[in-house]
Amino acid sequence: MNRTISTFVRVAMLASGLGVFATVSLVGAPAAQAQYTPPPPPPQGGQWAPPPPEYIATTEPVYYEGHAAYWYNNHWYWRDAGGNWGHYDQEPAFLADRRMHSPPERHEFARDHRR
Amino acid sequence: MRRWMRFSAPVLVMIGGLGLAACDKGSTEQSAPVASATATPVASATPPPAASAMPAEDPIADELRDYHRHHHHGGVASFISMAADTLGLDPAKKAQVEQIQTDLRAKMAPARDAEHDVLATIADGVAAGKVDNAKVDAQIAKVAAASATIHTASTDALTKLHDALSPVERNALSDKVLAHWEVWQKVNTEEKPASHEKGTHLARLTDVLALTPDQVSAIEKSLGTEPAPTPQTDPKPVDAYVQAFATAFRQDKFDPKTLNPQAMASAGHIARHGDARMARFFEAVAPVLTPDQRTKLATHLRERLNDSVASSK
């Protein structure tokens, strides 16, 4: 019985602890949105590295929100007017749908395009 | 029980801290405007970060690099036409742009035919075990001369191409032209001719022909170091032309004639440098090969005559 109560207390404390911190987080979130969010450091493995020129030269983009977006290494990347690359942290529904149903093609300028 | 609570408190704080971090990140992503806050700048466009190096296991990238090792006749106009191939246009606009590409390729035809002669002569020389250097040099001069006229002849086609595309498509085309130029430089100026590191021309040939280490060493020795660029082969004027084109093409108003100074300053450079480098490479390779390897390489080179964009058919 004591063991049952102890387990219940542990679960309750964990839940309440997480709840408090989650509430604090959510309350704090709007303030964070109004501020500049610096770019995150590149994650291990460089999976956020933008597509190399070979990829840009051979791959059809998808046009979305005024950008040519490229699906590369499980992210959509695009280039802004200043030539800097950006990516979507969360895949927009339009791009996800396009990727699922009509994925962008890559062109082989030598091998398969001989005529 | 009290002791357990004392030890569990720091753990709860840690868990809560993790929750704080996760919730903060998640809320920023979900509620911020899509175009700005979820799109996070990750790198400068020029030069690309080292981490963006193409995986070696990308055969399409390998093919593109090999393409740019063998075809130089059209210069920047070739990059533009190839860029138009991968714009991902809707069918109606694609048909319109293909018509413009046909016009553009017609302007490149004399240079393309001249380059076919170069490739054919090299292929014949490889099959025989010795490339006729003097003949190839004369043919390269003809490619360069024909290539030098392409910009002036293509102004109407380039204007039509600009007018056919939306602003975002023009940006995409400009990015792709810059990408082709970057790849071309990678394999024709940055890559050392005698290098047999993975992905280089010599490494690729080693795989295709099963070259022995002795053959590779002999080719390396023969290739030596690349000659310094001359005023007729210096890539810097080409870079100025490509950058000027990419900038001008993004604008609402585009007049290719404004690029004439850059085009004239770099006229024929890509063809002259690229074809000469290709010829030097095969001149070094041919004498080292066995008869079977010569036959195989000559066949491989003749197949390049049918590559997309470079084909006369």
Image (cartoon, coloured by chain):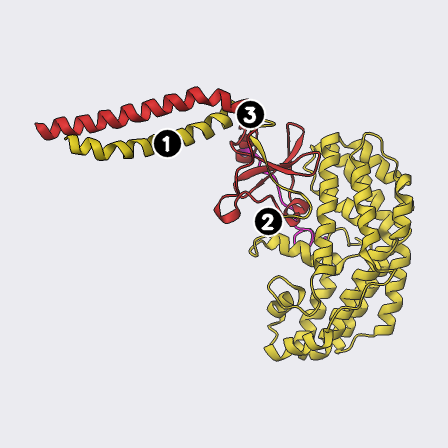
CA distance separating discs 2 and 1 = 33 Å
Q: Mark 2 points at which residue?
A: B52
Q: Mark 1 points at which residue?
A: B17
Q: Using the rendered image of the protein, determine whether residue B74 is visible from the camera's viewpoint.
A: no
Q: Give the foreground label among 2 and 1.
A: 1
CA distance separating discs 1 and 3 = 21 Å
Q: Which chain is rendered yellow in the image?
A: B
Residue A35 marker? 3
Three-letter amino acid code at disc 1? Gly
* Pointer 1 and pointer 3 on the same chain: no
Q: Give the range drawn in magenta.
A: A101-115
* Chain A display color: red
Above/below status of A76 relative to A14: below
Report the front residue among B191 and B272. B191
* Pointer 2 and pointer 1 on the same chain: yes
Q: Is residue A106 magenta?
A: yes
Name the subunit of mark 3: A
Element carrying mark 3? loop
Q: In which quarter of the image is the N terminus of chain B?
A: top left
